[in-house]
Image: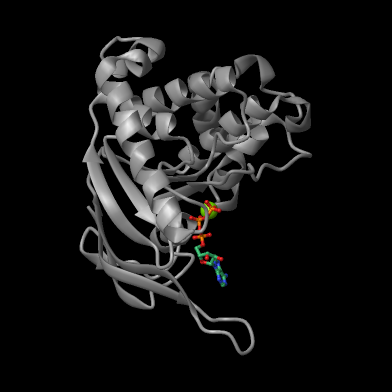
Amino acid sequence: MLEIHRASVFYPGREGTDAVEALRNIDLEIGPGEFVVALGASGCGKSTLMNLIAGFLAPSFGQLRLDGAPITGPGRDRAVVFQKHALMPWLNVIDNLAFGLKLQGVGREERYGVARRFLTLLGLEEFETSPVYMLSGGMQQRVGIGRALTADPRILLMDEPLGALDALTRERAQELILHIWQSQNKSVFLITHSVEEALFMGTKLIVMSPRPGRITHRFDLPFSRRFLAGQTAREVKASPDFIEMRETVLRIIFADEEQAA
Ligand SMILES: Nc1ncnc2c1ncn2[C@@H]1O[C@H](COP(=O)(O)OP(=O)(O)OP(=O)(O)O)[C@@H](O)[C@H]1O
Ligand SMILES: [Mg+2]
């Protein structure tokens, strides 16, 4: 479905300095229903890669295609959730959820119908008319994810969406995203700094290394499916093969860091 072929990105250097090679020769496919997670040290180009997929940025070399057609800019088929939610603080929860649809010119009845569906899915019914500034960070992030989903994108792009949450809220949010992923049948591209989160959520993991940003390792992951098949998050994360994989990935990341230092 989404194909990235030998994509490279150079950012112009500041006056007199060389261009920054942020990504080099990225090859990646995201198929229907796939959950791809990107992990890597700060500055390895994760957000740059997401911005390519979102169409906010064009590659310096290489191609990105969605269903065979070149990506030339942002589109409704791809929705983005940023680390800092971009909610409208003066609107209440339901109006935030309906906001994107309003911009698209969707009629009042239809957009509130869609918004209410997501309100229920996110477990925020009680807060329908609460102003978003009164919600906790975790709830605000849920509203942000819901708003991205109201446009019914094919691919949900998330850049460190849960980074600011405490451990318990974060695990609850991971579970919620997995349930949404399953029930809405979306493809997901998620960026995280947490190895545990990456392993728990993804069906595919890419590990990136900096200067220039490349994909150095790829893994297929079984863990999110175990959770969706009925194991608890704690059971999944405490299982021996999960722990072994976690240590493998941590070793890779620390080795990369030492090489870069
Ligand atoms: N607009 C820009 N102009 C110049 N250089 C940039 C620009 N955006 C990013 N870079 C550089 O490109 C590299 C990759 O940046 P990017 O933001 O994609 O990394 P990242 O993996 O998302 O990092 P983090 O984990 O800190 O969010 C970095 O060296 C960064 O300094
Ligand atoms: Mg980033």
Q: Residue at x 36, y 53 (%)?
A: 208
Most foreground residue, 81 or 215: 215
Relative to 20, is 49 on the left or the right?
left
Which residue occupies the extreme bottom position in the image?
16
The answer to whether one can see residue 186 in this image is: no
Q: Give the image quarter of residue 58.
A: bottom left
Up-down: is 141 above or below 51? Answer: above
Instruction: Please name the residue shown 51% across and 19% down the image.
Output: 172
Q: Which x, y percent locates residue 120?
A: 52, 19
Q: Residue at x 68, y 29 (%)?
A: 137
In the picture shown, does residue 97 fall above or below 22?
above
Residue 257 percent across, percent down from the top left? 44, 52
Measuring from the top left, give residue 171's x and y in whole percent.
50, 21
Q: Quadrant of residue 107?
A: top right
* Residue nearer the viewer, 22 or 181: 22
Instruction: Please indicate, yes or no, whether residue 99 appears anywhere in the rendered image.
Output: yes
Residue displayed at 34% across by 69% down: 24
- Front one among 87 and 151: 87
Is 183 drawn above or below residue 227 in the view shown? below
- Tell me: 208 left or right of 86: left
Relative to 99, 64 lies left or right: left
